[in-house]
Amino acid sequence: MADAIDFASNNLAPAVAAMKAHGRQTKTAGRFGCRRLDRTQGLLDGFDTGEVKLEVLWPNATTEGGKLGYPWYGTSSYAETVNGNSVVLKLSHGAHSVLLTGDLNEPSMKDAAELHGARLQAHVYKAAHHGSQKSDLGFMQLVSPHATVISAGDDGNDKHGHPRAELLGTVGRASGCEK
């Protein structure tokens, strides 16, 4: 844990400074007029300090009828579309990387895999949607993580049953660790 804190202190402070140098300041959405941004607009390019690099890989907007929009991923609810258009970040430090995937679901993972391919590879993978079963083996094989972090409750009251056995199997099959 001390190593993680040292890493954050030594590497994230320069990253924050780099973001401020680009004029990006964090503001509370409820207090200011906010609009939806997309990585293709060049406003969410991430940053690269030389030591630390942050890439915004998703969502990927489309233009239809002259209007910026997002792919529809909902088969049964609007929430699936919102989840499928989660922000995906890749944080790299030297040869090591972490992929943070928000609440991506299987269809959006397939689209991200098609768009980014091997660029998705990361040593540490933060499992999408708390370890739900809605993952894609092809996406996971591109990530090929050595470690997977799953944020799910362990109190026995998780009505969704996360992490799901299907996801644990997919993670095992796609792991970049030596067998």
Image (cartoon, rainbow, N blue to C red):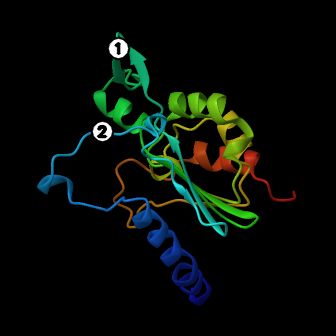
Q: Quadrant of the N terminus?
A: bottom right
Marking on residue 136: none
Q: Is residue 115 above or below residue 29?
A: above
The residue lying toward the viewer, choosing from 89 and 134, is 89
**From this viewpoint, which residue is outermost toward the right?**
179
Residue 126 visible from this viewpoint: no
Q: Which kind of residue does numbered mark 2 sit on?
A: Arg
Give the foreground label among 2 and 1: 1
Residue drawn at the location 38% of the way across and 20% of the way down: 75
Residue 157: image location, x then y, percent: 33, 59
Q: Is residue 64 above or below residue 136?
A: above
Q: Which residue is mark 1?
A: 66
Residue 161 visible from this viewpoint: yes
Q: Is residue 173 left or right of residue 170?
A: right
Q: Which residue is mark 2?
A: 36
Mark 2 crowdedness (10 Å alpha carbons): few <14, some 14-19, many ≥20:
few
The residue lying toward the viewer, choosing from 165 and 135, is 135
**From this viewpoint, which residue is outermost toward the top?**
65
Residue 14: image location, x then y, percent: 52, 75
Residue drawn at the location 30% of the way across and 39% of the way down: 36
SS for dot 2: loop
Q: Is residue 84 left or right of residue 7?
A: left
Mark 1 crowdedness (10 Å alpha carbons): few <14, some 14-19, many ≥20:
few
**From this viewpoint, which residue is outermost toward the left?**
31
Residue drawn at the location 44% of the way across and 60% of the way down: 152
Choose the circle earlier in sequence order: 2 or 1. 2
Residue drawn at the location 87% of the way across and 59% of the way down: 178
Image quarter of residue 109: top right
